[in-house]
Structures are given as C-alpha cells and as structure tokens.
Image (cartoon, grey):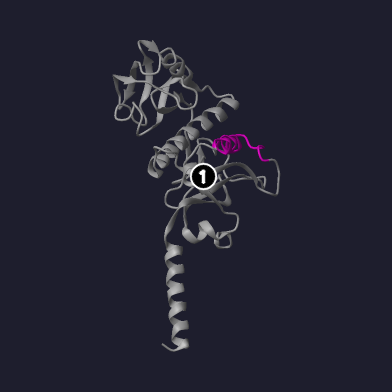
Amino acid sequence: MKPGRLLWAGAILLAVALGIAWLSPSDSYLVLPDRAKPLAELVEVEGERGADRDGGGIYYVDVVVRKASLLEAHVSALRPDGADVVPAHAIVPPGSSFDERRRQNLLAMDRSQEVAAAVALRELGYDVGSDPEGAEVVAVASDAPAAGKLREGDVIVGVDGETVATPDDLRRLIGLREAGETVRLRFRSDGETMTVEVKTVASPADGRPIVGIQVQQFAEIEVPIDVAIDLGNVGGPSAGLAFALDVVEELRGGVDGACAWPRRASSSWTAPSRRWAG
C-alpha cells in the first residue's frame, strides 16, 4: 500500500477511535454549574405584590450532572469550562442507582418547597402548623434487611410499641436493640397503617444496630395561603433558602435590597433530562 493511502487509513482509524471514545460513557460523572436563574417567575404566592419593583432579585444556581465520556474523563481540555469529573460513588452510593438517587432528590425538592413556604410565612407572622408526625423513608439500601419491606415515602410512626415522631426517636429506639435482633416497625403507606418485623444489622461505620434506611422528618405542614413553586425537573433540597427568601420578597419586599445586581441565595443540583438538586 502506498504511503499516502497508509496515512489516510491511519487518519480514518484515529477518527473512528476518537469518535467511539467521545460517545462512550465512562464510569465517572461530569459536574458542571449552570448559569444563575431568577426565581420570581417560578414562585407564585397568594396575595403577592406582583412584578419586581426594586431592580434586585433572588436567583438560584443549578448544577448539571451527567455521565462523562471516556475522552472527557481523561482529557481535561475537552471538558466544558468549569466542569469537574467525580467518581461514580460520589454521585451514586454503593447499593443505589442513578434512578433511585433521582427519586430521592425529587422527594427532597418537594419537601424543601413545603418547608421553605412554612418558614417564610411564619417569619411574616402567619399561623403555620407543622407538628412532627414520624420519620419518612427517603432511601432503602438494596442489600439491607429493610429491602422489600419498606419503600420510599413510607412514614415510620412506631418501634416496638413506642411512638416515633422524629428521626431521632427512630434511631434511639432501634439503638436499644443489639445488632442481629428484630424490631417491629409501625408505618403508614398509601393511607394505611401497617406493621413489619425487620432484622437489624451492625452499621459498618460505628457498629450500632440499623435496618438500612435513610429517613427525614415528616410533618403535615399547613399554611394559611397558597404557595406554588415549580422548578420543573430540578431536584434536591439545597434551593430551600432561595425559595423562602423569594416568598418573603413576593409578599413583603425588601429582601434583595435595591441592588442592581441579582443576588444568588442558593445552589441546586440538576442533570439534563434527569435534573436534581442537593
């Protein structure tokens, strides 16, 4: 084969190899902060003042999270400006999946919005009800004793006949057992109250008895006026501060001052077509 043809063949093979490397996902994730976005049009409050009148604004910053290609993982010059590559376990813990993390962060976003509205309205002098009513399951490890017995959204309200009002109650009552013993959990799911027995195991971190779930505070929050917050497919809890500040701004004003530059109150996590926060 002539040298010229060899060069062309080599160039084609190199281009094909680079194309495959660019399209093939790696085991790592790419984390990229997006631009700051205003909240004014995404937060609707009954009785709000209307359009922003003082030139300021409450903004949030989301972070795009997606699989890095093989080339992006190994060649920093090919990554978008400001992007970092992080190992998979930093985004998806062992025993979980990307979809599970996605669901968890959407639940966290819903709760963040409820809490933000309650905090803001209480600050403004409204009567807000928020009594603690249990420990809500936000994740169940696939290899844990609770797998198949509890699921995300279940609210644990009792352990061995004792009432659970907070996550601390749950940890304390399970902690009264020895690792390997069984606990009886009472929980609410889809409007029904049920009981299940779950064997405990020793925590890898400190040896205390656990059943392999992550929980957050559950409370029925009652607010006296309507507050609607819609960030689309963004998930996670970290924009809660921005939500609360914007609710106050919508009703009373003066939060952002008469500042010509927008103020960023919080950050959140997102991923293209699978956006999340926190």
Is residue 252 inside the magenta stretch? Answer: yes
Q: Position of residue 170 (x, y in %)?
A: 43, 18
Asked whether 229 or 126 is in front, the reply is: 229
Estimate the x, y position of residue 86 in percent, counting from the top left: 53, 48
Reply above or below: 209 against 142: above
Considering only vertical position in the picture, is 165 above or below 149?
A: above
In the rendered view of the protein, which quadrant contains the N terminus?
bottom left
Residue nearer the viewer, 85 or 2: 2
Q: Position of residue 98 (x, y in %)?
A: 41, 44
Q: Is residue 257 left or right of residue 166?
A: right
Most distant residue in the top direction: 161
Indicate the quadrant where residue 157 lies.
Answer: top left
Q: Amino acid at mark 1?
A: Trp
- Please state the horizontal and vertical placement of residue 168, each as a whole percent of the image: 48, 18
Q: Nearer the viewer, residue 176 or 274?
A: 176
What span is in magenta?
Answer: 240-256
| Residue at which label 1 appears | 269
Q: Residue placed at 45% from the left, 39% from the top? A: 93
Q: Is residue 264 left or right of residue 214?
A: right
* Residue at 52% from the left image edge and 32% from the top image edge: 117
Tag 1's secondary structure?
A: strand
- Residue drawn 42% across and 60% down? 24
Q: Residue at x 50, y 47 (%)?
A: 87
Name, please, the residue furthest toward the front. 1
Look at the magenta stretch and give its main secondary structure. helix
Residue 99 quadrant: top left
Within 10 angstroms of label 1, few (less than 14), some, or many (20 or more) residues? Answer: many
Decide whether residue 205 is among the magenta residues. Answer: no
